[in-house]
């Protein structure tokens, strides 16, 4: 297994010194944002993690290896390349065998982070149950991964293009804890709140770290979702964003866009319809997740 992993020097050193490490996905760079905002965001997020006492490990597939920690040149490569495969659980073996460039989704990043023994992962938002899934069966692989892979995902909730109530029902069935960081309701990515109430809340990173340690010490399999609302000054108006999402969903349906193409299409359409405000919100919420995720990772390392 170790033959497939390639750790950056920074990550190797962090492991040797017992420093906290925070995993980051690469799909947000290659498929989630346009250039150059994508690479600027990636560099800023990595720096936030370093500034707060941990080491970033952006994860991707390059030349038949799972890279745990990317160089600046590799970040640029993923930001600019148009031939990057989007990697979920089902794709990892094939893309390694064919030595393709692969950007890891939430599910794939969780798998790779666990292989590298990294327990905390920061992203924008998780995937979930898509609207209309009762007929399409369109459910993100992220949810299944959260049920079985021991990695905590710090995010701004589930993307608001999803069916949030069904997403929460699915996570509850799978026994995945969803902990609100300083919130009693599920944040909806671009907005700080939704109509979905949470049963678990933590107001300090240490409480989350202790909760994760207890869960994993007891060998209760699976990850956790730590929902961290977008900072107030960057949050979008709930009615505006919901109207925009409805328009984007209608257009996706009319254009027969399905499966893994849905999310990039919807995010692109939402950006277009909000005159780029959604992209700014997306960048700011990822940065804020990096800050809180690093505080949790450091607290976990200190236990």
Image: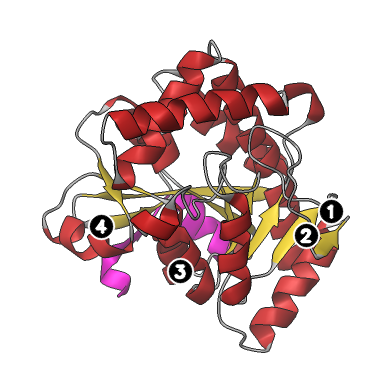
Q: Which image quarter is the N terminus in?
A: bottom left
Q: Position of residue 70 (x, y in %)?
A: 40, 43
Kindly give the residue lying farthest to the left in the view shown: 98
Q: Which residue is mark 3?
A: 144
Does the magenta-highlighted stretch encompass residue 110? no
The residue wearing badge 2 is 198
- Mark 2 / mark 4, whichever is N-terminal: 4
Give the spatial CA distance, label 3 vs label 4. Answer: 24 Å
For residue 203, side relative to residue 214 (left or right): right
The nearer-to-camera label among 4 and 1 is 1
Q: Residues within 10 Å of mark 2 (few under 14, many from 20)?
A: some
In contact (CB < 8 Å): disc 2 and disc 1: yes
Cα separation, mark 2 vs mark 4, equals 39 Å
Query: Toward which corner of the image does residue 160 lie, by quadrant?
Result: top right
Tell me which numbered mark, 1 or 3, is placed earlier along the sequence: 3
Horizontal and vertical percent position of residue 281: 63, 25
Which region is colored magenta?
Answer: 1-16
Rounded to the nearest angstrom, the CA distance separating label 2 from label 1 is 5 Å
Residue drawn at 75 percent across, 52 percent down: 295
Residues at badges 4 and 1 in contact (C-beta under 8 Å)? Answer: no
Quarter of the image where the C terminus is located: bottom right
Q: Earlier in the sequence, mark 3 or mark 2?
A: 3
Task: Please tell me how crowded label 3 is: few (under 14), some (14-19), or many (20+) other residues with Cα within 10 Å.
Answer: some
The vertical placement of 239 against 4, above or below, is above
Graded by Cα atoms within 10 Å as few (under 14), some (14 to 19) or many (20 or more), the crowding at tag 1 reads some
Q: SS of the residue at dot 2?
A: loop
302 up-or-down from 123: above or below: below
Which numbered marker is on residue 184?
Answer: 1
Identify the residue at horizontal 63%, vertical 55% (top origin): 165
Q: Earlier in the sequence, mark 3 or mark 4?
A: 4
Residue on which disc 4 sits: 65
Foreground of the two, 254 or 283: 254
């Amino acid at each position: 297994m170790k033959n497939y992993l390639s750790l950056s020097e920074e990550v190797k050193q962090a492991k040797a010194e017992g420093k906290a490490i925070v995993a980051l996905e690469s799909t947000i760079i290659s498929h989630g944002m346009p250039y150059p905002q994508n690479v600027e965001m990636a560099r800023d997020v990595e720096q936030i993690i370093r500034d707060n006492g941990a080491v970033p490990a952006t994860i991707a597939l390059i030349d038949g290896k799972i890279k745990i920690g990317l160089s600046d040149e590799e970040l640029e490569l993923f930001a600019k390349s148009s031939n990057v495969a989007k990697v979920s659980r089902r794709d990892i073996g094939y893309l390694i065998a064919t030595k393709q460039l692969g950007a890891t989704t939430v599910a794939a990043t969780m798998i790779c982070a666990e292989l590298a023994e990294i327990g905390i992962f920061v992203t924008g938002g998780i995937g979930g149950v898509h609207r209309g899934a009762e007929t399409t069966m369109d459910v993100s692989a992220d949810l299944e991964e959260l049920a079985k892979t021991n990695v905590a995902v710090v995010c701004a909730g589930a993307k608001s293009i999803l069916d949030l109530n069904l997403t929460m029902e699915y996570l509850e069935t799978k026994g995945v804890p969803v902990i609100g960081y300083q919130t009693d309701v599920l944040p909806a990515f671009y907005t700080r709140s939704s109509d979905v109430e949470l049963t678990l809340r933590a107001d300090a990173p240490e409480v989350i770290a202790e909760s994760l340690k207890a869960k994993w010490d007891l060998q209760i399999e699976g990850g956790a979702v730590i929902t961290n609302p977008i900072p107030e000054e960057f949050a979008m108006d709930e009615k505006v964003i919901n109207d925009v999402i409805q328009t984007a969903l209608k257009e996706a349906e009319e254009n027969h866009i399905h499966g893994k193409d849905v999310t990039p299409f919807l995010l692109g359409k939402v950006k277009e319809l909000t005159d780029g405000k959604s992209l700014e919100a997306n960048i700011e919420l990822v940065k804020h997740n990096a800050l809180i995720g690093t505080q949790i990772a450091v607290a976990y390392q200190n236990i």
